[in-house]
Amino acid sequence: MKKLLLCSMVALAAFGTNAQTSFTYGICTDNINGVGTDIAGTNYSAAIEVPEEVAKAMQGSRLTAVTVGFNSGLSKDATIYLTYDLKGEPFYTQPETKFLKAKNFTTATLDTPYEIEGRKFYIGYTYRQTRSNDKPIAFDAEALDGVSLFSHLGIWPDGGTPEWDVFPSFGSVCIRGIIEGDNLPSNALLPLRLSLPKSVGVNVDFNYSVDVYNRH
């Protein structure tokens, strides 16, 4: 519990504001590794979380595009979505986004930009695996503390319903949001690794370290 609290405090404290026109939100690196189930007919829904404290820092700005990393697969179509609840209905969907290049990123401009309301929301996409050897979902394989707090993956067979989980061993799912506005954060330092001793004595000083990643 302490680890989650410290990570949230770091993310909140690291957002300063300054006049800018665009900002990239996401913590995945450019390293693309594929994830798949080896079962044709598997459906996926990958998402990143925009926590409330981050959304408040960017309130009034607009999410104008979504960048997704793609690894490999016969089908290139996906549906971009935005939602407040991973188990609920999305409030925005945009189908038939084309992921044309393997081991690469594709940016889909939203038909209707989303004005950020200051509440937590998720940026995600759905994809259907059509071959058993496809590994379509891209994670960056940077298995660092904190990364899995922001990355989610739902998997379900045809006719089923999504089962959501986080996969820290995969690293961060390769999704980024492009945000535009007149009053955006000038620095966005997001926590990647928090190092704490396993135990400490009462009233005994101890050292800890936090590694952060500037997404701008």
Image (spheres, helix red, strand yellow):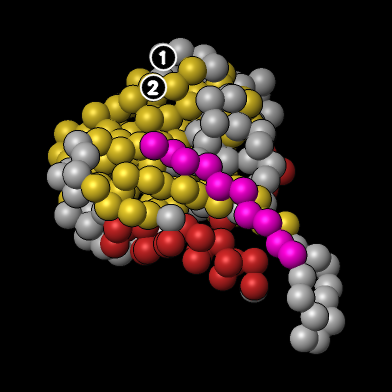
Report the disc number at residue 106: 2
Q: Which label's residue is closer to the chain start, 2 or 1?
A: 1
* 172 w.r.t. 38: above or below: below
Depth check, front residue: 4 or 209: 209
Report the disc number at residue 128: none
Q: Position of residue 31 (x, y in %)?
A: 59, 25
Q: Position of residue 109 (x, y in %)?
A: 24, 29
Specify the farthest residue to the top. 101
Q: Which residues are magenta?
A: 207-216
Position of 117 with respect to 69 (left or right) is left
Label 1, on which residue? 100
Tell whether label 1 touches label 2 (CB within 8 Å).
yes
Crowding at dot 1, Cα within 10 Å, few <14 / some 14-19 / many 20+, comes out as some
Q: Position of residue 41 (x, y in %)?
A: 55, 32
Would residue 130 be seen by someone viewing this image from the given angle?
A: no
Depth check, front residue: 186 or 39: 186
Kindly identify the amino acid type of the residue bearing the numbered disc 1. Answer: Leu
The residue that appears at 42% across and 62% down in the rendered structure is 12
Does the magenta stretch mainly form a helix, a strand or a loop? Answer: strand
Of the 4 image quadrants, the one containing the N terminus is: bottom right
